[in-house]
Amino acid sequence: MSLFKRKSKPVVGLDISSTSVKLVELSMQSEGYQVESFAISSLPAGAVVEKNINDVDLVADVIRQLLNKSRCKIKDAAVAVAGSSVITKVIDMPSGLTEDALEEQITIEADQYIPFPLDEVAIDFEIQGQANEDSNVMQVLLAACRKENIELRIAALEQAGLTPKVIDVEAYAIERALPLIVDDWEADADQLVAIMDIGATVSTLSVLKNHQTIYAREQLFGGNNLTDEIQRRYGLSQAEAEQAKVQGGLPDDYLADLLEPFKETVLQQVTRSLQFFYSSGNYSQVDHIILAGGVARLGGLAPLVQDHLETLVSVANPFVSMKYSSKVSSEDLTEAAPSLLIAAGLAMRGID
């Protein structure tokens, strides 16, 4: 299964995280992209651990539920593996090689760049262009991922009745969706855009320049930290605490004692992640921060981060300029949008 394989017809984008599966189906109309369907379903505890599938049967069951819930009829699917499970390297190769010759040469040289036995990894590549205008050397992006990570995703899709057409990388799905969020991204590609995707258990900072990811870092922190505090404070089960966090109805002291301190902790995590980025290279400021993931929906979080860091901050909504089909609730989609960035980027693979 190719990490970069090109598509000729629509695919449904499925983002399999540690706590949920998210589905997005897009089509291309004369006015641009249209959202045909979307859905989100929680995963049973332990089905996916740190974005690695642990129970194929449970994940397949949830995917089937999503397909029924969304009324999606597409049978071809795109999924992604976490950036932390993929090794990428830009290497120089002689220009003018045919694709077959290039593949053969990369296979021969791959063991220089990959610290695992080659029979345990899936390898793919994509030509990035000439090293410079007068060079006889081209730059090639090499990507390698353990076969097990890919095979388990394929098994879950097939068991759910889908045909896996694309195995992507989360960072590349985000790159693809970014122009949907940042209006001037194409006009001013030189700007540094930082995307802080805060999920239930893992937060990922991606920094992009010239349409490419130049930095990515994951850390164990997410919305479950707040859920755990609610559970402890009010004696609720995990499910009850998550429901109360989303739907409300908690005691009056929740805002001051739990929610506001949690938002301050999120601010600290964003600040610390950016400091790691600044210390790793030649940059000391980003131009735009985008908050994504379920935590990004917290009221007042974006202004808090913007005021503290004195940088433009927005909440991710890749569907803001799209039309919706009649079976899509615009209100529900807007609420869920920050969590659907990767799924949207995956769905774009079938119509780009």
Image (cartoon, rainbow, N blue to C red):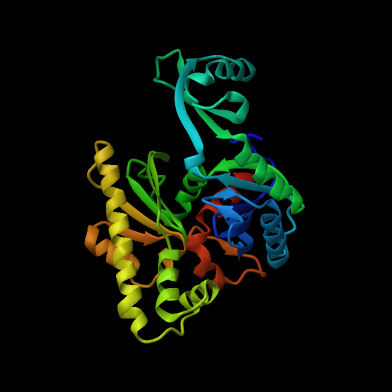
Q: Does residue 296 sit above or below 95 in this rendering?
A: below
Residue 130 x, y percent position in the rendering: 45, 21
From the viewer's perspective, is residue 346 above or below residue 90? below
For image coordinates 62% across by 54% down, the residue present is 30
The quarter holding residue 168 reads top right
* Up/down of 222 relative to 154, above or below: below
* Place of residue 136 in the rendered image (x, y in percent of width and height, measured from the top left): 45, 12
User: Is residue 107 shown above or below 285?
Assistant: above
Q: Residue 53: x, y in percent?
A: 61, 49
- The quadrant of the rendering that contains the C terminus is top right
315 sits to left or right of 22:
left
> Is residue 351 in sight in this rendering?
no
Front in this rendered view, residue 298 or 185: 298
- Between 8 and 108, the residue placed more toward the observer is 108
Q: Using the rendered image of the protein, determine whether residue 191 is visible from the camera's viewpoint.
A: yes
| 351 relative position to 345: left or right | right
For the N terminus, give its image quadrant: top right
Q: Residue at x 60, y 45 (%)?
A: 349
x, y percentage for residue 269?
Answer: 32, 56
